[in-house]
Amino acid sequence: MLRPNLPSIDDREGEYVPQGLPTVVDAHVHIFPDNIFSAIWAWFDENAWPIRYRLASSSALDHLLSHGVSHIIALQYAHRPGISRMLNRYMVKKCREFPEKITGMAAIFPGEKAAEEILKEAFDNGLKGVKLHAHVQCFDMNAEEMDIIYDLCESEQKPMVMHVGREPKSTAYHCDPYEICSAEKLERVLQNFPKLRICVPHLGFDEISDYRNLIEKYDNLWLDTTMVLTDYFPLKESIELDNFRVNRIMYGSDFPSIPYNWDRELKCLKESNLSRENMEWILHKSADGLFQVT
């Protein structure tokens, strides 16, 4: 569980992607309008960790691209009903600002009025999928209101990134992630919507073993590595990515909302014993497969 005032790590950042790594696609980067970013930074200051990179969206995207990241999956989520259209227009604008370098995901608040219309509009304007965050939006992934989103994404062949792992949780959220999030609940979605492609961030922390088993069973599930390879959170199990189905694992940084240097996780991957082939899957091939980057 998150607690207030988690530490920052004053590690040295690299000027470029670590030498010797394959092409890097960052599958988990957040962008928001300035006022929302400011509110997020204030929330993290009070309830989690100090964010090291307090950058506006364009600066955050440029930072990664200028440091050698080849492509970015850009994510937003609607913190309340009624702002999804605004966020989606903002995402479209940023994708056009960085042509062919950004894959933008649409925002929607589950259960909000005209959800299907909002998402169809976002897809028509070039957004490539949907991002949801159960901890913030407090949705039950098995609730009937979710079927509208699942049905549309399945029929339109648009992937979903859903933070439905139970951690990192906080008492500052308006719901208990342990009550609404579980690998078991997600498995029902995978079974009911077998053509719906889903990525769960943070390797499904803190049910990492359960999610590892799910990607062995289901071809429509991916996981990203965001923040769990960096020795920042105390994990109840060690992570040996060679034991995972690597064509369903992708690298993500959570940039810019991190308490350490932008390339910390890339350095951890470089220092691992992963084969070159497995490294290629994790650093770009899996993301290419899910998001059709190339």
Image (cartoon, rainbow, N blue to C red):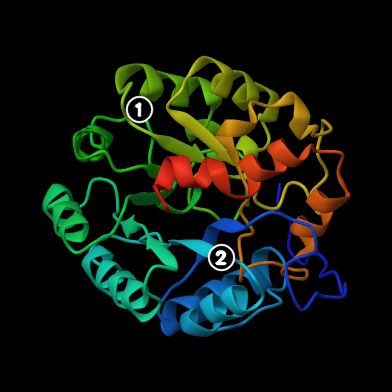
Report how far apart the C-alphas of labels 2 and 1 lie in the structure: 36 Å
Number of numbered discs overlaid on the protein picture: 2
Q: Position of residue 244 (x, y in %)?
A: 69, 27
Which secondary structure lies at badge 2?
A: loop
Numbered label attached to residue 142: 1
* In the depicted structure, whether residue 234 falls above or below residue 85: above
Q: Position of residue 209 (x, y in %)?
A: 69, 24
Residue 168 makes an appearance in the image = no
- Going by the numbered disc 1, the residue's amino acid type is Asn
Q: What's the residue at 30%, 53% (across, down)?
A: 109
* In the depicted structure, whether residue 238 falls above or below residue 259: above
Q: What's the residue at 36%, 81% (across, down)?
A: 97
**Mark 2 Cα-neighbour bin, 10 Å: few <14, some 14–19, many ≥20:** some
Q: Nearer the viewer, residue 179 or 52?
A: 52
Is residue 82 rendered to the left or right of residue 271?
A: left
For mark 2, what is the residue? 70
